[in-house]
Image: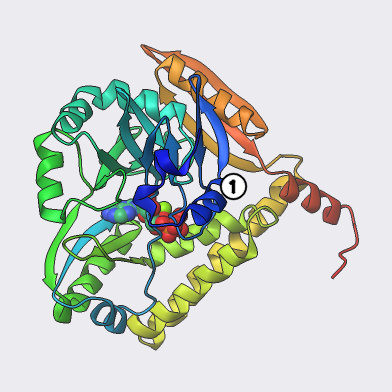
Amino acid sequence: MFSYDRYGDPFDLSEDEFESFVDNMTKREYDGTEYLHLSDYGRVERGTVLYDGEVVRGFPKVPRTLVLSEGVPRQFDGEVAVEEKMNGYNTRVARLDGDKLAFSRSGIVCPFTTKFLGRVYGDELDALFDEIPDAVVCGEMIGRDNPYTAHGYEEVGSLDLRVFDVRDARSGESVPVDERRELVEEHGLPSVPFYGVHDADEAAGEIREVIEDLDERGREGVIMKTPDVSKQLKYTTSAANQGDLAYAFSLPFDYGQAFMFRRIIREAFQAHEFDDGGETKERAAALGESILGSMVETVGRIDDGERVGERHTVRAAPEEVDAILEHFRGMGLHLVIEEDRVEGDERFVEFVKKTQATNDKTENYLEGGIVRE
Ligand code: ATP
Ligand code: MG
């Protein structure tokens, strides 16, 4: 069913390599159709999907620079297009056999995003797919009522899409930045904010200013791209690095230690590049607050008998809310529903994804449990 003859040719793999690629994929089902998705890194992009005879390439991993002034000119020559990096969750929408499906970063059909985007942007997406049938619309789902990554944006009330790429489903090749921004606008879809195209030699200074402005506004960062999007590079603000740290350290035993360490490293290199002595002192105090402040708060809350977890809200059509709750439960997440009410045509649910390790370990230590190190 998932044979080399049917799917193999876009991947540039031998028949044997294709077989081991398929062996590494996970089988799932959506609406009666079995499909495979690649949730690991390998020669083919993570998130690649084989669905009913069609291929949807994963969104490539975006490398990061820790030093703008050296990293940008080293990674780019010619021109660099700069777009805001928005903090939400990645979605890829493709029209397969007439159905518009939204895939997660790892290539799972997200029934919530599929239904939500079908309702909100169904006609706009259809018009774009009529023009480019093999397109994959890649974007970030942002806003406070977000089941995966809750981060508020003042310009988004609840939850919305921001498109940052349009790719060919089989080859993964992108529509060039300028052309894509026009195409997306023409079809009435919203794009991520744009910070222009710069000469690679001079871009670092301009990006530095963009970053300082985004940082003040509590936003995540930028993605730099060659105009044809064959190369991408990311860089984040201190607000994002410290915000992630505060969040991760509020659930210290549930987050991977590598996640935390990487963000501290980013701050060190940014301090070296951006700060004078006084600024580094301020940054250090704020970093300490993000780490220790949020952890102490968690310990206090658990000591007061509260249970901590990842809190999310969703506000959407009732069947969309059902779809996300069922999807999470199907993936084995333990959800505690804290609020559930109808608001006009919409249903609002506030839920907590239980994070067992932080609750259990903290409670145990508070009761004098021994630490084995
Ligand atoms: P990876 O680095 O593998 O993509 P990650 O989860 O670590 O995974 P991030 O650090 O968030 O990813 O950076 C890449 C992600 O940024 C993309 O997958 C995409 O979802 C998101 N993103 C937000 N805005 C943009 C943009 N303007 N252009 C490209 N990607 C963007
Ligand atoms: Mg992200």
Q: Is residue 329 left or right of residue 276?
A: right
Foreground residue, 316 or 329? 329
Position above or below: 253 against 25: below
Residue 356 rendering spot, x and y as whole percentages: 73, 44
Q: Quadrant of residue 294?
A: bottom right
Q: Which residue is mark 1?
A: 23
Residue lying farthest bottom? 277
Quarter of the rendering containing residue 220? bottom left
Depth order, front residue of 38/75? 38
Instruction: Say whether residue 345 is left or right of residue 174.
Output: right
Q: Is residue 143 visible?
A: no
Give the color scheme: rainbow, by chain, secondary structure or one colour. Answer: rainbow
Question: Residue 326 at x, y = what percent?
Answer: 57, 23
**Image position of 219 with respect to 26: above or below:** below
The residue closer to the viewer here, 30 or 5, is: 5
Task: Please identify the quarter of the rendering in which residue 316 is found.
Answer: top left
Quick check: 351 left or right of 170? right
What is the total number of numbered labels drawn onto the structure image?
Answer: 1
Q: Amino acid at mark 1?
A: Asp
Q: Left or right: 180 with respect to 143?
A: left
Residue visible at 37% across and 29% down?
101
Find residue 307 and report its horizontal and vertical position in percent: 71, 40
Mark 1 residue crowding within 10 angstroms, few (<14) / some (14–19) / many (20+): few
Is 188 rendered above or below residue 326? below
User: Does residue 97 appear in this view?
Assistant: yes
Find numbered disc 1 in the image and state the secondary structure of the residue it sits on.
Answer: helix
Quadrant of image for the C terminus: bottom right
Q: At 35% from the left edge and 80% from the top edge, which residue is drawn? A: 67
